[in-house]
Image (cartoon, coloured by chain):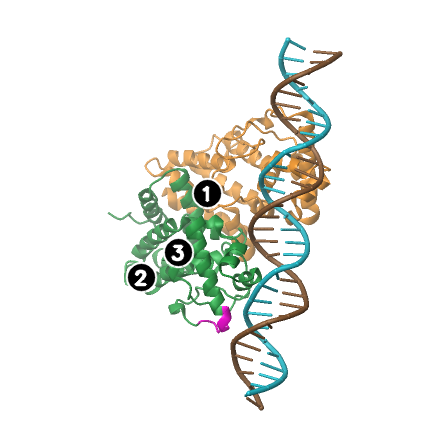
Chain colours: A orange, B green, C brown, D cyan
DNA sequence: AAGAAAACTGGACCGCGGTCCGCTTATGGT
DNA sequence: ACCATAAGCGGACCGCGGTCCAGTTTTCTT
Protein backbone atom coordinates (compact mmCIF):
# COMPACT_ATOMS: atom_id res chain seq x y z
CA UNK A 1 0.00 0.00 0.00
CA UNK A 2 2.99 2.17 0.17
CA UNK A 3 3.08 1.98 -3.55
CA UNK A 4 -0.15 3.75 -4.22
CA UNK A 5 1.18 7.12 -3.31
CA UNK A 6 2.90 8.42 -6.32
CA UNK A 7 0.23 10.46 -7.86
CA UNK A 8 -0.78 12.28 -4.74
CA UNK A 9 -1.13 15.98 -5.19
CA UNK A 10 0.64 18.98 -3.91
CA UNK A 11 -1.06 22.28 -3.53
CA UNK A 12 0.68 25.61 -3.60
CA UNK A 13 3.64 25.81 -1.29
CA UNK A 14 3.68 26.98 2.24
CA UNK A 15 4.90 30.37 3.29
CA UNK A 16 6.32 29.54 6.65
CA UNK A 17 7.03 25.90 6.32
CA UNK A 18 9.62 26.11 3.62
CA UNK A 19 9.12 23.49 1.06
CA UNK A 20 10.64 24.26 -2.26
CA UNK A 21 7.62 23.51 -4.29
CA UNK A 22 5.86 20.40 -3.49
CA UNK A 23 4.27 20.70 -0.14
CA UNK A 24 2.36 17.49 0.41
CA UNK A 25 -0.10 19.80 1.97
CA UNK A 26 -2.89 18.00 3.48
CA UNK A 27 -4.79 21.17 4.09
CA UNK A 28 -7.93 20.27 2.31
CA UNK A 29 -8.69 16.66 1.89
CA UNK A 30 -9.68 16.74 -1.74
CA UNK A 31 -9.10 13.48 -3.58
CA UNK A 32 -5.46 14.18 -4.16
CA UNK A 33 -7.05 17.17 -5.74
CA UNK A 34 -5.21 19.14 -8.36
CA UNK A 35 -1.89 17.99 -9.55
CA UNK A 36 -0.32 21.39 -9.06
CA UNK A 37 0.44 22.00 -12.66
CA UNK A 38 3.79 20.30 -12.53
CA UNK A 39 5.49 20.25 -15.82
CA UNK A 40 5.02 16.93 -17.55
CA UNK A 41 8.59 15.76 -17.13
CA UNK A 42 8.67 16.97 -13.57
CA UNK A 43 5.58 14.99 -12.69
CA UNK A 44 7.03 11.93 -14.32
CA UNK A 45 10.25 12.30 -12.38
CA UNK A 46 8.36 12.83 -9.16
CA UNK A 47 6.54 9.55 -9.63
CA UNK A 48 9.72 7.72 -10.51
CA UNK A 49 11.42 9.11 -7.45
CA UNK A 50 8.67 8.04 -5.08
CA UNK A 51 8.57 4.63 -6.65
CA UNK A 52 12.31 4.30 -6.36
CA UNK A 53 12.21 5.38 -2.74
CA UNK A 54 9.52 2.86 -1.91
CA UNK A 55 11.50 0.15 -3.61
CA UNK A 56 14.62 1.06 -1.69
CA UNK A 57 12.73 0.93 1.58
CA UNK A 58 11.37 -2.48 0.73
CA UNK A 59 14.82 -3.72 -0.13
CA UNK A 60 17.13 -2.10 2.37
CA UNK A 61 14.92 -0.53 4.99
CA UNK A 62 14.54 3.15 5.63
CA UNK A 63 18.23 3.52 6.26
CA UNK A 64 18.88 2.56 2.68
CA UNK A 65 17.00 5.55 1.41
CA UNK A 66 19.86 7.78 0.52
CA UNK A 67 19.15 10.80 -1.59
CA UNK A 68 21.81 9.74 -4.01
CA UNK A 69 20.55 6.18 -4.09
CA UNK A 70 17.03 7.33 -4.79
CA UNK A 71 18.23 9.62 -7.52
CA UNK A 72 20.25 6.87 -9.08
CA UNK A 73 17.46 4.32 -8.82
CA UNK A 74 15.10 6.75 -10.48
CA UNK A 75 17.74 7.58 -13.06
CA UNK A 76 17.56 11.21 -12.22
CA UNK A 77 20.02 13.78 -10.99
CA UNK A 78 20.51 14.38 -7.31
CA UNK A 79 19.51 17.99 -7.63
CA UNK A 80 16.14 16.94 -8.92
CA UNK A 81 15.35 15.04 -5.77
CA UNK A 82 16.07 18.05 -3.63
CA UNK A 83 14.23 20.42 -5.91
CA UNK A 84 11.16 18.21 -5.67
CA UNK A 85 11.13 17.31 -2.01
CA UNK A 86 13.30 19.88 -0.35
CA UNK A 87 15.18 17.47 1.84
CA UNK A 88 15.24 13.90 2.96
CA UNK A 89 12.49 14.50 5.46
CA UNK A 90 10.32 15.93 2.72
CA UNK A 91 10.79 12.86 0.60
CA UNK A 92 9.93 10.56 3.47
CA UNK A 93 6.89 12.66 4.31
CA UNK A 94 5.73 12.46 0.74
CA UNK A 95 5.86 8.71 1.13
CA UNK A 96 3.56 9.01 4.11
CA UNK A 97 1.31 11.51 2.45
CA UNK A 98 -1.14 8.99 1.14
CA UNK A 99 -1.90 7.43 4.48
CA UNK A 100 -1.98 10.84 6.12
CA UNK A 101 -4.63 12.01 3.69
CA UNK A 102 -6.53 8.82 4.27
CA UNK A 103 -6.58 9.38 7.99
CA UNK A 104 -7.58 12.95 7.53
CA UNK A 105 -10.39 12.01 5.23
CA UNK A 106 -11.55 9.43 7.71
CA UNK A 107 -11.95 11.78 10.61
CA UNK A 108 -13.13 14.72 8.57
CA UNK A 109 -15.78 13.01 6.55
CA UNK A 110 -15.65 9.27 7.12
CA UNK A 111 -18.16 7.16 8.98
CA UNK A 112 -18.54 7.28 12.76
CA UNK A 113 -17.11 6.82 15.26
CA UNK A 114 -14.11 8.51 13.63
CA UNK A 115 -16.02 10.85 11.38
CA UNK A 116 -18.84 13.26 12.10
CA UNK A 117 -21.99 11.68 13.41
CA UNK A 118 -20.65 10.24 16.62
CA UNK A 119 -20.42 12.17 19.87
CA UNK A 120 -17.23 14.23 20.18
CA UNK A 121 -15.98 12.12 23.04
CA UNK A 122 -16.31 8.97 21.03
CA UNK A 123 -14.70 10.56 18.07
CA UNK A 124 -11.76 11.59 20.19
CA UNK A 125 -11.36 8.08 21.54
CA UNK A 126 -11.50 6.60 18.07
CA UNK A 127 -9.12 9.21 16.77
CA UNK A 128 -6.38 8.28 19.20
CA UNK A 129 -6.75 4.61 18.54
CA UNK A 130 -6.61 5.20 14.81
CA UNK A 131 -3.50 7.31 15.06
CA UNK A 132 -1.93 4.78 17.36
CA UNK A 133 -2.33 1.89 15.01
CA UNK A 134 -1.47 3.86 11.94
CA UNK A 135 1.79 4.94 13.53
CA UNK A 136 2.53 1.45 14.71
CA UNK A 137 2.14 0.12 11.19
CA UNK A 138 4.61 2.53 9.68
CA UNK A 139 6.81 3.07 12.66
CA UNK A 140 10.14 2.98 10.91
CA UNK A 141 9.08 5.38 8.25
CA UNK A 142 7.36 7.64 10.73
CA UNK A 143 10.48 7.79 12.85
CA UNK A 144 12.73 8.47 9.93
CA UNK A 145 10.40 11.13 8.60
CA UNK A 146 10.57 13.07 11.86
CA UNK A 147 12.05 16.44 11.04
CA UNK A 148 14.40 18.31 13.32
CA UNK A 149 12.64 19.31 16.54
CA UNK A 150 12.10 22.87 15.40
CA UNK A 151 9.92 21.76 12.51
CA UNK A 152 8.02 18.97 14.16
CA UNK A 153 4.92 20.97 14.94
CA UNK A 154 5.08 23.35 12.05
CA UNK A 155 4.21 20.72 9.51
CA UNK A 156 0.73 20.96 7.99
CA UNK A 157 -0.14 17.35 8.68
CA UNK A 158 0.56 17.86 12.36
CA UNK A 159 -1.45 21.04 12.27
CA UNK A 160 -4.37 19.23 10.81
CA UNK A 161 -4.46 16.67 13.59
CA UNK A 162 -4.06 19.38 16.14
CA UNK A 163 -6.92 21.40 14.79
CA UNK A 164 -9.18 18.42 14.79
CA UNK A 165 -8.40 17.43 18.35
CA UNK A 166 -8.76 21.00 19.52
CA UNK A 167 -12.14 21.20 17.89
CA UNK A 168 -13.33 18.01 19.54
CA UNK A 169 -12.03 19.12 22.89
CA UNK A 170 -13.86 22.39 22.66
CA UNK A 171 -17.08 20.49 22.35
CA UNK A 172 -16.29 18.27 25.29
CA UNK A 173 -14.60 20.59 27.77
CA UNK A 174 -15.40 24.10 26.54
CA UNK A 175 -13.90 25.79 29.57
CA UNK A 176 -10.47 24.29 29.31
CA UNK A 177 -7.42 25.51 27.43
CA UNK A 178 -8.18 23.17 24.59
CA UNK A 179 -5.25 24.14 22.47
CA UNK A 180 -2.81 23.17 25.17
CA UNK A 181 -4.77 20.08 26.01
CA UNK A 182 -4.70 19.03 22.39
CA UNK A 183 -0.95 19.34 22.34
CA UNK A 184 -0.68 17.25 25.45
CA UNK A 185 -2.91 14.57 24.01
CA UNK A 186 -1.12 14.48 20.69
CA UNK A 187 2.26 14.32 22.37
CA UNK A 188 1.26 11.06 23.90
CA UNK A 189 0.77 9.66 20.41
CA UNK A 190 4.20 10.66 19.17
CA UNK A 191 5.70 7.90 17.02
CA UNK A 192 8.93 8.14 18.95
CA UNK A 193 7.06 7.44 22.15
CA UNK A 194 5.17 4.56 20.62
CA UNK A 195 8.43 3.15 19.42
CA UNK A 196 9.97 3.41 22.82
CA UNK A 197 7.05 1.87 24.65
CA UNK A 198 6.43 -1.00 22.30
CA UNK A 199 9.87 -1.89 21.04
CA UNK A 200 12.17 -0.81 23.80
CA UNK A 201 9.92 -1.50 26.77
CA UNK A 202 7.88 -4.25 25.24
CA UNK A 203 4.42 -2.94 25.99
CA UNK A 204 1.67 -4.49 23.90
CA UNK A 205 -0.42 -2.21 21.77
CA UNK A 206 -3.49 -3.02 23.81
CA UNK A 207 -1.93 -1.37 26.79
CA UNK A 208 -1.26 1.77 24.82
CA UNK A 209 -4.78 1.69 23.56
CA UNK A 210 -6.39 1.48 26.97
CA UNK A 211 -3.84 3.99 28.13
CA UNK A 212 -5.17 6.41 25.52
CA UNK A 213 -8.76 5.80 26.53
CA UNK A 214 -7.86 6.33 30.15
CA UNK A 215 -5.98 9.49 29.32
CA UNK A 216 -8.94 10.88 27.43
CA UNK A 217 -11.26 9.97 30.26
CA UNK A 218 -9.10 11.69 32.83
CA UNK A 219 -8.52 14.80 30.78
CA UNK A 220 -12.15 15.24 29.94
CA UNK A 221 -13.41 14.20 33.34
CA UNK A 222 -15.56 11.48 31.85
CA UNK A 223 -15.88 7.81 32.56
CA UNK A 224 -13.73 5.42 30.56
CA UNK A 225 -15.78 3.36 28.11
CA UNK A 226 -17.20 0.06 29.42
CA UNK B 1 26.47 29.20 34.56
CA UNK B 2 27.12 27.12 31.58
CA UNK B 3 30.75 27.50 32.32
CA UNK B 4 30.73 25.67 35.61
CA UNK B 5 30.22 22.30 34.04
CA UNK B 6 33.61 21.11 33.07
CA UNK B 7 34.53 19.02 36.00
CA UNK B 8 31.34 17.04 36.12
CA UNK B 9 31.81 13.36 36.42
CA UNK B 10 31.12 10.39 34.25
CA UNK B 11 30.48 7.01 35.69
CA UNK B 12 31.04 3.71 33.94
CA UNK B 13 29.42 3.45 30.56
CA UNK B 14 26.00 2.17 29.72
CA UNK B 15 25.36 -1.22 28.24
CA UNK B 16 22.39 -0.42 26.10
CA UNK B 17 22.76 3.27 25.61
CA UNK B 18 25.97 3.21 23.72
CA UNK B 19 28.24 5.92 24.83
CA UNK B 20 31.86 5.31 24.08
CA UNK B 21 33.13 6.04 27.47
CA UNK B 22 31.84 9.07 29.12
CA UNK B 23 28.24 8.60 29.92
CA UNK B 24 27.17 11.79 31.66
CA UNK B 25 25.16 9.42 33.70
CA UNK B 26 22.97 11.12 36.05
CA UNK B 27 22.02 7.86 37.68
CA UNK B 28 22.98 8.69 41.17
CA UNK B 29 23.10 12.26 42.11
CA UNK B 30 26.41 12.14 43.92
CA UNK B 31 28.31 15.43 43.87
CA UNK B 32 29.72 14.85 40.43
CA UNK B 33 30.99 11.85 42.27
CA UNK B 34 34.01 9.99 41.06
CA UNK B 35 35.96 11.29 38.16
CA UNK B 36 36.00 7.91 36.50
CA UNK B 37 39.71 7.42 36.57
CA UNK B 38 40.26 9.27 33.35
CA UNK B 39 43.84 9.51 32.47
CA UNK B 40 45.27 12.87 33.41
CA UNK B 41 45.65 14.11 29.88
CA UNK B 42 42.24 12.79 28.94
CA UNK B 43 40.61 14.65 31.79
CA UNK B 44 42.41 17.81 30.81
CA UNK B 45 41.30 17.47 27.24
CA UNK B 46 37.75 16.80 28.30
CA UNK B 47 37.68 20.02 30.26
CA UNK B 48 39.21 21.96 27.40
CA UNK B 49 36.67 20.55 25.01
CA UNK B 50 33.71 21.47 27.15
CA UNK B 51 35.11 24.90 27.68
CA UNK B 52 35.69 25.34 23.99
CA UNK B 53 32.19 24.19 23.20
CA UNK B 54 30.68 26.60 25.68
CA UNK B 55 32.74 29.41 24.20
CA UNK B 56 31.62 28.55 20.71
CA UNK B 57 27.99 28.56 21.79
CA UNK B 58 28.41 31.94 23.39
CA UNK B 59 30.02 33.31 20.26
CA UNK B 60 28.17 31.68 17.40
CA UNK B 61 25.17 29.98 18.90
CA UNK B 62 24.57 26.28 19.03
CA UNK B 63 24.82 25.99 15.28
CA UNK B 64 28.44 27.08 15.53
CA UNK B 65 29.30 24.04 17.58
CA UNK B 66 30.90 21.93 14.95
CA UNK B 67 32.85 18.94 16.07
CA UNK B 68 35.79 20.13 14.07
CA UNK B 69 35.48 23.64 15.40
CA UNK B 70 35.36 22.41 18.96
CA UNK B 71 38.36 20.22 18.38
CA UNK B 72 40.29 23.07 16.86
CA UNK B 73 39.28 25.53 19.56
CA UNK B 74 40.40 23.07 22.19
CA UNK B 75 43.58 22.41 20.22
CA UNK B 76 42.83 18.75 20.11
CA UNK B 77 42.29 16.20 17.37
CA UNK B 78 38.87 15.55 16.02
CA UNK B 79 39.02 11.91 16.97
CA UNK B 80 39.46 12.90 20.59
CA UNK B 81 36.16 14.70 20.65
CA UNK B 82 34.33 11.65 19.39
CA UNK B 83 36.22 9.31 21.66
CA UNK B 84 35.20 11.37 24.61
CA UNK B 85 31.60 12.20 23.81
CA UNK B 86 30.56 9.66 21.24
CA UNK B 87 28.79 12.07 18.98
CA UNK B 88 27.60 15.62 18.73
CA UNK B 89 24.57 14.89 20.82
CA UNK B 90 26.77 13.45 23.53
CA UNK B 91 28.83 16.60 23.65
CA UNK B 92 25.79 18.80 23.87
CA UNK B 93 24.31 16.61 26.56
CA UNK B 94 27.49 16.84 28.53
CA UNK B 95 27.04 20.59 28.40
CA UNK B 96 23.62 20.16 29.95
CA UNK B 97 24.78 17.65 32.46
CA UNK B 98 25.39 20.13 35.20
CA UNK B 99 21.93 21.59 35.18
CA UNK B 100 20.40 18.16 34.79
CA UNK B 101 22.16 16.97 37.91
CA UNK B 102 21.09 20.07 39.69
CA UNK B 103 17.47 19.46 38.86
CA UNK B 104 17.76 15.87 39.87
CA UNK B 105 19.31 16.79 43.16
CA UNK B 106 16.55 19.29 43.74
CA UNK B 107 13.71 16.89 43.40
CA UNK B 108 15.48 13.95 44.98
CA UNK B 109 16.77 15.62 48.08
CA UNK B 110 16.15 19.35 47.90
CA UNK B 111 13.70 21.36 49.95
CA UNK B 112 9.94 21.17 49.39
CA UNK B 113 7.85 21.61 47.40
CA UNK B 114 10.18 20.01 44.87
CA UNK B 115 11.97 17.70 47.22
CA UNK B 116 10.66 15.21 49.74
CA UNK B 117 8.59 16.70 52.51
CA UNK B 118 5.75 18.08 50.47
CA UNK B 119 2.72 16.09 49.42
CA UNK B 120 3.22 14.10 46.23
CA UNK B 121 0.68 16.19 44.36
CA UNK B 122 2.47 19.38 45.25
CA UNK B 123 5.79 17.87 44.32
CA UNK B 124 4.42 16.89 40.96
CA UNK B 125 3.13 20.39 40.33
CA UNK B 126 6.43 21.91 41.30
CA UNK B 127 8.32 19.39 39.24
CA UNK B 128 6.60 20.34 36.04
CA UNK B 129 7.06 24.01 36.62
CA UNK B 130 10.71 23.50 37.37
CA UNK B 131 11.27 21.45 34.23
CA UNK B 132 9.35 23.97 32.22
CA UNK B 133 11.46 26.90 33.22
CA UNK B 134 14.70 25.03 33.07
CA UNK B 135 13.95 24.00 29.51
CA UNK B 136 12.89 27.47 28.58
CA UNK B 137 16.18 28.87 29.84
CA UNK B 138 18.27 26.56 27.75
CA UNK B 139 15.92 26.01 24.88
CA UNK B 140 18.41 26.22 22.05
CA UNK B 141 20.81 23.86 23.69
CA UNK B 142 18.05 21.49 24.70
CA UNK B 143 16.73 21.38 21.18
CA UNK B 144 20.12 20.83 19.66
CA UNK B 145 20.93 18.13 22.18
CA UNK B 146 17.86 16.14 21.23
CA UNK B 147 19.09 12.82 19.91
CA UNK B 148 17.49 10.97 17.05
CA UNK B 149 13.97 9.87 17.97
CA UNK B 150 15.03 6.32 18.71
CA UNK B 151 17.28 7.42 21.52
CA UNK B 152 15.16 10.11 23.02
CA UNK B 153 13.73 8.04 25.81
CA UNK B 154 16.63 5.73 26.28
CA UNK B 155 18.82 8.36 27.79
CA UNK B 156 19.48 8.04 31.53
CA UNK B 157 18.52 11.61 32.27
CA UNK B 158 15.11 11.06 30.73
CA UNK B 159 14.81 7.84 32.65
CA UNK B 160 15.50 9.62 35.87
CA UNK B 161 12.71 12.12 35.35
CA UNK B 162 10.39 9.35 34.29
CA UNK B 163 11.08 7.30 37.36
CA UNK B 164 10.47 10.24 39.59
CA UNK B 165 7.16 11.17 38.02
CA UNK B 166 6.03 7.58 38.03
CA UNK B 167 6.82 7.33 41.69
CA UNK B 168 4.87 10.45 42.53
CA UNK B 169 1.92 9.31 40.44
CA UNK B 170 1.81 5.99 42.20
CA UNK B 171 1.29 7.82 45.44
CA UNK B 172 -1.44 10.00 44.01
CA UNK B 173 -3.37 7.67 41.74
CA UNK B 174 -2.30 4.17 42.74
CA UNK B 175 -4.83 2.45 40.53
CA UNK B 176 -3.81 4.06 37.27
CA UNK B 177 -1.22 2.92 34.75
CA UNK B 178 1.29 5.32 36.20
CA UNK B 179 4.07 4.45 33.85
CA UNK B 180 2.01 5.44 30.86
CA UNK B 181 0.63 8.46 32.61
CA UNK B 182 4.14 9.58 33.42
CA UNK B 183 5.10 9.37 29.80
CA UNK B 184 2.09 11.41 28.82
CA UNK B 185 2.90 14.06 31.39
CA UNK B 186 6.53 14.26 30.44
CA UNK B 187 5.70 14.47 26.76
CA UNK B 188 3.91 17.67 27.44
CA UNK B 189 7.15 19.12 28.78
CA UNK B 190 9.19 18.24 25.72
CA UNK B 191 11.55 21.08 24.83
CA UNK B 192 10.45 20.88 21.21
CA UNK B 193 6.88 21.48 22.29
CA UNK B 194 7.85 24.33 24.56
CA UNK B 195 9.75 25.85 21.70
CA UNK B 196 6.80 25.57 19.40
CA UNK B 197 4.32 26.98 21.83
CA UNK B 198 6.38 29.89 23.06
CA UNK B 199 8.38 30.88 20.02
CA UNK B 200 6.26 29.81 17.12
CA UNK B 201 2.85 30.39 18.59
CA UNK B 202 3.78 33.12 20.99
CA UNK B 203 2.28 31.71 24.15
CA UNK B 204 3.62 33.22 27.35
CA UNK B 205 5.26 30.92 29.84
CA UNK B 206 2.53 31.63 32.35
CA UNK B 207 0.05 29.96 30.11
CA UNK B 208 2.19 26.88 29.85
CA UNK B 209 2.57 26.89 33.58
CA UNK B 210 -1.12 27.00 34.35
CA UNK B 211 -1.58 24.52 31.53
CA UNK B 212 0.68 22.14 33.39
CA UNK B 213 -1.15 22.63 36.65
CA UNK B 214 -4.44 22.05 34.91
CA UNK B 215 -3.12 18.95 33.22
CA UNK B 216 -1.95 17.53 36.52
CA UNK B 217 -5.29 18.34 38.11
CA UNK B 218 -7.22 16.59 35.37
CA UNK B 219 -5.00 13.55 35.23
CA UNK B 220 -5.06 13.05 38.96
CA UNK B 221 -8.67 14.02 39.38
CA UNK B 222 -7.79 16.69 41.89
CA UNK B 223 -8.64 20.35 42.13
CA UNK B 224 -6.24 22.83 40.55
CA UNK B 225 -4.37 24.89 43.14
CA UNK B 226 -5.95 28.16 44.31
C1' DA C 1 5.50 28.55 -36.04
C1' DA C 2 8.78 30.67 -33.59
C1' DG C 3 10.94 32.91 -30.02
C1' DA C 4 11.28 34.17 -25.15
C1' DA C 5 10.61 33.25 -20.53
C1' DA C 6 10.00 30.11 -17.02
C1' DA C 7 10.76 25.69 -15.15
C1' DC C 8 13.46 21.87 -14.71
C1' DT C 9 17.80 19.06 -14.84
C1' DG C 10 22.11 16.93 -13.33
C1' DG C 11 26.35 16.59 -11.54
C1' DA C 12 30.32 19.01 -9.55
C1' DC C 13 31.13 20.85 -5.19
C1' DC C 14 31.04 21.79 -0.10
C1' DG C 15 30.95 20.99 4.92
C1' DC C 16 30.02 18.18 8.58
C1' DG C 17 29.43 14.03 11.28
C1' DG C 18 31.54 9.89 12.08
C1' DT C 19 35.26 6.04 11.52
C1' DC C 20 39.83 4.10 11.49
C1' DC C 21 44.34 3.01 12.58
C1' DG C 22 49.28 3.82 13.25
C1' DC C 23 51.66 6.53 16.63
C1' DT C 24 52.36 8.56 21.40
C1' DT C 25 51.99 8.84 26.26
C1' DA C 26 50.60 7.82 30.88
C1' DT C 27 50.51 4.23 34.46
C1' DG C 28 51.45 0.49 37.53
C1' DG C 29 54.32 -3.55 38.45
C1' DT C 30 58.92 -5.01 39.58
C1' DA D 1 64.29 3.69 37.38
C1' DC D 2 62.53 1.02 33.73
C1' DC D 3 59.66 -1.52 30.86
C1' DA D 4 55.22 -3.55 29.17
C1' DT D 5 50.88 -2.55 28.22
C1' DA D 6 46.78 -0.36 28.10
C1' DA D 7 44.78 4.10 27.26
C1' DG D 8 44.60 7.95 24.64
C1' DC D 9 45.54 10.73 20.48
C1' DG D 10 44.93 12.96 15.97
C1' DG D 11 44.29 13.58 11.35
C1' DA D 12 43.42 11.26 6.91
C1' DC D 13 39.47 9.37 5.07
C1' DC D 14 34.52 8.31 3.87
C1' DG D 15 29.58 8.98 2.85
C1' DC D 16 25.77 11.68 2.96
C1' DG D 17 22.85 15.73 2.99
C1' DG D 18 22.47 19.89 0.83
C1' DT D 19 23.76 23.89 -2.58
C1' DC D 20 24.68 25.88 -7.03
C1' DC D 21 24.52 27.04 -11.64
C1' DA D 22 25.33 26.39 -16.58
C1' DG D 23 22.81 24.17 -19.82
C1' DT D 24 18.36 21.99 -21.51
C1' DT D 25 13.44 21.33 -22.07
C1' DT D 26 8.70 22.76 -21.84
C1' DT D 27 5.18 25.88 -22.09
C1' DC D 28 3.18 30.31 -23.17
C1' DT D 29 2.46 34.20 -26.18
C1' DT D 30 1.55 36.27 -30.36
Which residue lies at the image location 73% right of the left edge and 37% below the top edge?
A: A75
Labels 2, 1: front one: 2
Residues tagged by mark 2 and mark 3 found on one chain of the structure: yes
Position of the N terminus of chain A by quadrant: top right
In the rendering, which numbered label is found on residue B115? 2
Q: How many residues crowd around disc 2 within 10 Å: few (fewer than 14), some, or many (20 or more)?
A: many
Considering every residue shown, the one lying at the far left of the view is: B226
- Is B37 contained in the magenta span? yes
Q: How many marks?
A: 3
Q: Which residues are magenta?
A: B35-42
- Tell me what residue is drawn at x 42 percent, y 60 percent: B97
Q: Position of residue C9 (x, y in %)?
A: 69, 32
Asked where in the image residue A83 lies, by quadrant, the reply is: top right
Q: Which residue is mark 1?
A: A186
Tell me which label, 2 or 3, sits earlier in the chain. 2
Label 2 or label 3, whichever lies nearer to me, is 2
Can the viewer see residue B109 in this picture? yes
Q: Are marks 3 and 1 in contact (CB under 8 Å)?
A: no
Comparing B97 with A187, the one in front is: B97
Report the residue marked by disc 3: B175
C-alpha separation, residue under disc 3 versus residue under disc 1: 23 Å
Amino acid sequence: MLYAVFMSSALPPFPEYQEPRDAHQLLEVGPASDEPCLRADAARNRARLLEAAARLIAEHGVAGVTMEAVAAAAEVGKGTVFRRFGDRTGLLMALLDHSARQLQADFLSGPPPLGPGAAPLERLRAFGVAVLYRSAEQLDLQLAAQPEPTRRFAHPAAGSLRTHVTMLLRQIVPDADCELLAHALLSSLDPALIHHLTRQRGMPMERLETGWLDLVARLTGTEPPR
